[in-house]
Image (tube, rainbow, N blue to C red):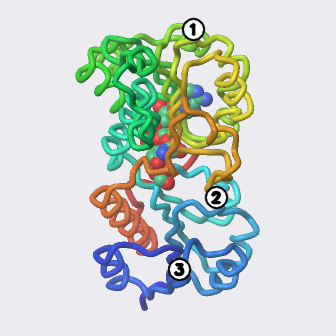
Amino acid sequence: MKPTIFVTRPVPEEAEAYLREHCLVDKWEGDGPVPRDRLLERLGNAEGLLTSGGKIDAELLDHAPRLRAVSNISVGYNNFDLAAMKARGIIGTNTPEVLNDTVADLIMGLILSAARRIPELDRYVKEGRWQRSDDEILFGLDVHHKKLGIVGMGGIGEAVARRGKFGFGMSVLYHNRHRKPEAEAALDASYLTLPELMREADFIVLMTPLTPETKGLIGAAEFALMKETAIFINASRGATVDESALVEALKSGQIYGAGLDVFEHEPVASDHPLLTMPNVVTLPHIGSATEHTRNQMAMIAAQNLVLALKGHTPPNVVRELK
Ligand SMILES: NC(=O)c1ccc[n+]([C@@H]2O[C@H](COP(=O)([O-])OP(=O)(O)OC[C@H]3O[C@@H](n4cnc5c(N)ncnc54)[C@H](O)[C@@H]3O)[C@@H](O)[C@H]2O)c1
Ligand SMILES: O=C(O)[C@H](O)CO
């Protein structure tokens, strides 16, 4: 007898076909993300859940008495209440590694966009404001040979560091929960404390997972240490940064600019002060959003789920907050 699963968002054909081969698939057919109350109604029979970010907490698990595994189509798993899942013997999985290069490419895009003011000056040209006499008002900052500071030197952090080091001749500084001697050797990277990194780096890239320790990790005290020419990039989760402090740091000229792929509340409200600042580049959480990478993530997530439901240990089980 095939296990029943619930799929909360459309997945590529290949992943859906694979799931149907191994499971009885029930899926959300509505537009947009499944509303929480509708999801809870649909979980009565589900032994597996394929999702990408909705909260998996005690309330949801109470509505899913047969649930054995939850598979995220994402590397981040801050949506999992791991204690509640563990208490019920439910396995959680994610999709690490496969998206490292895709997200790192986007982060380089944010760095270049903020430093060279690409979106701002694109609008400038398209709005017919470009004058032959324009000169200094179009200046930005160099990226090459500057100091790249990575906070959270994991899979994505290292992929960004490689691009900075070997593509742009940058020197790599990093702060992480644990030192990484191999990365230090391969990238000639220097380990710094968080305050040291804030003072030293020209580009600060935040790439930690969202955990109780990293919530608001970068706030007023950290922005106060940054150079006036520093550019702050966040592609981790919005809540790792105190957004009000970021707004103040940008408004007061404490830092030069920011590049953001993530926000505390997504989609970000259209009247959010960060959206009014020309020195902030904003994106709608598209770090891993290429067809190739998202297809691979969906397939890996499907395989994780099927393996777990067959009683095997999938390669990407998450056991604790990392
Ligand atoms: N914008 C996007 O679309 C997008 C895409 C992928 C991942 N992400 C986010 O990026 C996060 C990182 O992804 P990854 O694949 O590199 O994860 P990873 O687990 O490989 O790396 C995370 C690193 O952060 C470090 N870390 C954890 N807590 C820390 C702390 N308190 N201080 C310093 N370092 C700490 C860990 O030791 C680890 O080295 C994900 O959890 C997810 O939230 C966002
Ligand atoms: O964590 C991830 O994989 C990305 O943020 C996509 O949700």
Image position of 132 with respect to 291: above or below: above
Return the disc, 2 or 3, that comes first in the chain's sequence: 3
Point out residue 200 in the picture as x, y percentages from the top left corner.
51, 8
Which labelled disc corresponds to residue 86? 2
Q: Name the residue at 62% across, 45% down.
A: 263
Q: Name the residue tied to disc 1.
A: 199
Q: Quadrant of residue 193?
A: top right
Of mark 1 and mark 3, the one earlier in the sequence is 3
Q: Position of residue 92 (x, y in %)?
A: 53, 60
Q: Secondary structure at mark 3?
A: strand
Residue under the point 46% across and 12% down: 191
Amino acid under label 1?
Arg
Secondary structure beneath label 1: helix
Which residue is the site of mark 3? 6
Mark toward the viewer: 1 or 2: 1
Residue at 28%, 75% in the rendered image: 14
Counting the numbered discs, the total is 3
Q: Position of residue 298 (x, y in %)?
A: 37, 65
Q: Position of residue 236 (x, y in %)?
A: 53, 40
Of marks 2 and 3, the one in the foreground: 3
Q: Confirm if mark 1 falls within 8 A of ligand 1.
A: no
